[in-house]
Image (spheres, rainbow, N blue to C red):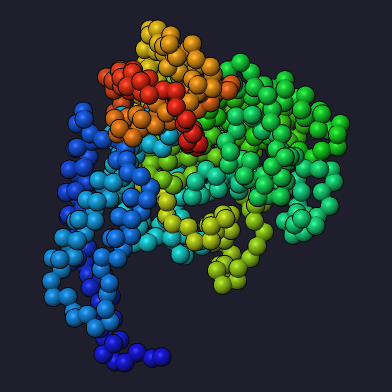
Amino acid sequence: MSMTAPELQSARTRIHATYSPDLLSAASQTLSEALTQHARSLQTPDGQVLNWNPPLENIQLALRKLNSHVTSSTEPEVQSQQPKVQEFQQLTQLMLEKGHNLQNPRYIGHQVPASVPLAGLFDAIASVTNQVMAVYEMGPWATAVEIALIKMIGKEIGFPTDKFSGLVTHGGSLANLTGLLAARNLTCPEIWQQGASAKNEPMPVILASSDAHYSLTRSAGILGIGTENILKVSLDQQRRMNPLALREMILKCQSENRKIIAVIACACATPIGAFDPLNEIADLCEQFQIWLHVDAAHGGPTCFSQHHNYLTAGLHRADSVVFDAHKMMFMPALCAFLFFKDKAHQSAAFQQQAPYLFDPSAPEIAEYDLGLRTIECTKRANSYSLWGVWSLFGKGLFADLVDVTFETAQIFYEMLEQTTDFEPVHKPECNILVFRYQPDWLQQLSIEQQNLFHFKLRRVIIESGEFYIVHSVIDGQAAFRITVMNPLTTDIHLTKLLETIRQKSSELRTSFPASVQPDHCEQT
């Protein structure tokens, strides 16, 4: 049914009000003030890290806000923008009050950073103006920014100039999937078109570090290789992939007539932050002509640091590399890079055409139509923040961020070594450290009870809002796991963490043992 002329005019009036530059200006000033006050509040010693509320309570509140304003088709034209600015202020404040405060120095949980604040402002430009990418003409500046960053980061990794290529995706999981898809298509090209009906003889497999991220197992399932055909290579005493074990597994696969799609190494793996020996692994992959994929989502930016870049030695020898800017480059999520050592492989993952997008009259532009290489057809310009911060502060900032957070984890390790009731599980190679609370009375309990106590104790700590840490299970025994993802975290905060663990433990002990279900917190 068609609209009447008055109805059409009324709808247009309401829409026009939402696009008002004056409304944008007033709301932007309100947002700037709110963000500034919020940032200052996070530096206070007693500010909350996690604003904990039960899931249903938060959902109900969010639903109430959605239902708080219902537009009527006969609603009169809004004469003043002030009510909307006030509502915007209230909604902004609610979002800040209920959100997770990663900029608080006592956030030392997941591998999600307290992003550089100005990065968010550059990112806002992409969001407000809706800069997107697929073909060059859709996002010429966004494409230029992405390619420039690919060139700069690839140079830091050590790829030969003009020999490599790359792209940016929405997260490391997509980057891992895309890199392995290219490896699969080059090794088993028939699967792309024939799918499950393809005769996969010999049987395709992937060899991966036993500590490889769970997204890689997901990738094996999605790619039709099967999760049971991702074979785990055993680790050495430092939880790094053992090259001798890798060699034995390669020979075993050859003797069993299995086709190796790729070897997956980690730089670093999430459980304890261990960096695999990339040069030794690359030697084997070159010897046996196997695709080497390195998941350097977390540890890739280590290459910026003169103090720690030895950890990523050999990264440039990988056929594909995943490198997250939204981890150790401290950018807002999501901004994940995927690099191909050989530029010829950049289109191996996808073999499709979309005539309405790709212009045959300008074939020289096709090189810059990045949508040919990604799972996303429309992709937001998610590298604006990195380009802006790099241009403003220089690449030295990324070395500083790596150096400071790695050193802070080392300081914490040394603190733990001086205690009698805490035990570090390993010496940290980066900013990830796993440790256990082990007072004498707790060690007298069974491993099952110790594990339950650790799980419950972490839950008490994070719900208090005093700290945010995560848990891990290493060799069957529960532990705490911290990742120093805020460069403002100092030994003062870490000393306070130990005091908080002891205090909360003393309070919890009075009601323990109890029936506790562990929370399965993903390590990201």
Q: Which of the pair 26/325 is nearer the observer? A: 26
Instruction: Check the picture and name the quadrant holding the N terminus.
Output: bottom left
Residue 67's x, y, as percent?
A: 30, 66
Position in image of residue 429 (x %, y %): 49, 20
Q: Is residue 160 left or right of residue 151?
A: right
Residue 88 is drawn in which quadrant?
bottom left
**Quick check: can you spot residue 56?**
yes
- Which of 358 and 267 lies nearest the eye of the viewer? 267
State whether residue 181 is above or below residue 228: below
> What residue is at 72 percent from the left and 40 percent from the top?
228
In percent of width and height, residue 89 lies at 19, 56
Q: Along the horizontal axis of the image, is 350 left or right of 1?
A: right
- Answer with the quarter of the image where residue 198 lies: bottom right
Residue 160's image quarter? top right
Q: Residue at x 60, y 48 (%)?
A: 178
Nearest to the observer: residue 372 or residue 432:
432
**Res. 163 visible in picture:** no
350 relative to 458 in the view: left or right: right
**Residue at left offset 75%, top offset 45%:** 187
Asked if 496 appears above or below 46 in the picture, the reply is: above
Residue 479 percent location from the top left of the image: 48, 22
